[in-house]
Image (spheres, helix red, strand yellow):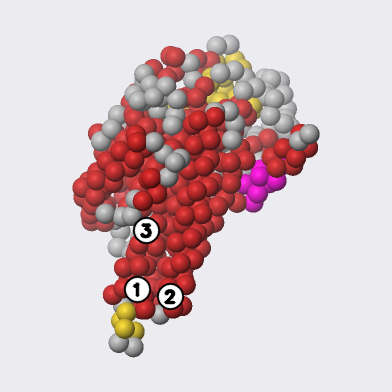
Amino acid sequence: MPDQSFLQWPFLADEHRDLARDLEAWCQEVLPRHRDAAANDAPTHAHAAGGAHADVDAATRSLVRALGDGGWLEQAVVAPHGGIRSQLDVRSLCLCRETLARHWPLADFAFAMQGLGCGPISLFGSEAQQARFLPPVARGRAIAAFAISEAEAGSDVAAMSTRATPDGDSFVLDGAKTWISNAGIADHYVVFARVVDADSSDDSASRRGTSDLAAFIVEADRPGLSADERIDTIAPHPLGTLRFEGCRVPRANLIDEVGAGFRIAMATLDVFRSTVGAAALGMARRALDESIAYAGQRMVDGAPLVDKQMIQAKLADMAVAVDQAALMIYRAAWTKDQLGGRISREAAMAKLVGTEAAQKVIDEAVQLFGGQGVVSGSIPEELYREVRALRIYEGTSEIQRLIIARQTLLAASQSP
């Protein structure tokens, strides 16, 4: 059983402590079977093309179903439509992601995308939208996805060029989204687009701003939507590009109203950015645990490696980085849960500190393991590949620094 002393911190309540302990027990019992099955189905080389996508797709689908059967996806949506609370509880989401990521990053991915892909619906969806789309996701019988990134826009939401043209009781979507998690396996996508007039000739990102952005629920089988372009990454996940060519979406699938897209996106990221830090934290904890165990049994000059003061100093720095990140993450989550409102600054800090600290801790683990740390399939090597993307998606570390600076300057300007 890993060290769970952090559960006694005042940021957490008894319900969170029970959740973490129960999920830990579930992970130890259930996830090894899924990992073994995925390993048996995987190509000989982890990064091989071709069959790799089918294997990771199947593993993700299996994990989503298992998480649904276990009741864990109830944390990712709101009640009464499959969830256990009327509002998303960020501390619970963080604890789930941290625990799952420590055991298997792909399990965290499967959980996280169910929450993020339904986040706009949970936070802003109508009663009818929630009743239709959330229950299958909570049961693990449907897969969700969040589609905001574009090749030329990236983290600059105001520069997106995907268009939604009103046409009677529908909108017609044209454009492309890329770096979309669960592309190709999702049952629905929450897609952000710029609403334009039918006679508008502006089909580029030159028309900047956020006042005309909107969010739409787009079922995967809508004519005009294709999701067959996949992207290979160093840590294989279902990832790809969506293309919209005259994709007709009913007005009933518009979340909130035209012009609310930017607000919906930022409020959703306010919730889930902290959880990205938590996933990174889980990987960092695993790296620290593995490093302690390895240093204790690795013999050098007739003594365990852990007896070397230089190694002890490395382990101390890793432990400090883990606790610093955890404090920032659960501070942000507590703030959202207890005080409500926007927490852009706190969430950005949580993601920045959590992901940057995890990268350093895992790099130290690879170094401590020496040659074993770069052997394909070893735990440090897997963590090294898995953690890298977390400093990029849902806003890069550079974007987080800009958010923190702007929010800090704004607060200073408003001080008496």
- The earlier-in-sequence mark between 3 and 1 is 3
Residue 255, how many percent across, how many down?
53, 21
**According to the image, label 2 marks what residue?**
311
The quarter in which the C terminus is drawn is top right
Label at residue 286: 3
Q: Mark 3, residues whose alpha carbon is within 10 Å: few (<14), some, or many (≥20)?
A: many
**According to the image, label 1 marks what residue?**
295
Residue at 52%, 22% (x, y): give it.
124
Residue at 26%, 54% (x, y): give it.
1
Residue 403 within the segment the image draws in magenta: yes
What's the residue type where badge 2 is placed? Answer: Ile
Residue 215 visible to the viewer: yes
Label at residue 412: none
Res 169 → quadrant: top right
Marks 3, 2: nearer the viewer: 2
Range of the magenta residues?
398-406
Residue 78, how many percent across, how many down?
41, 24
Residue at 62%, 23% (x, y): give it.
260
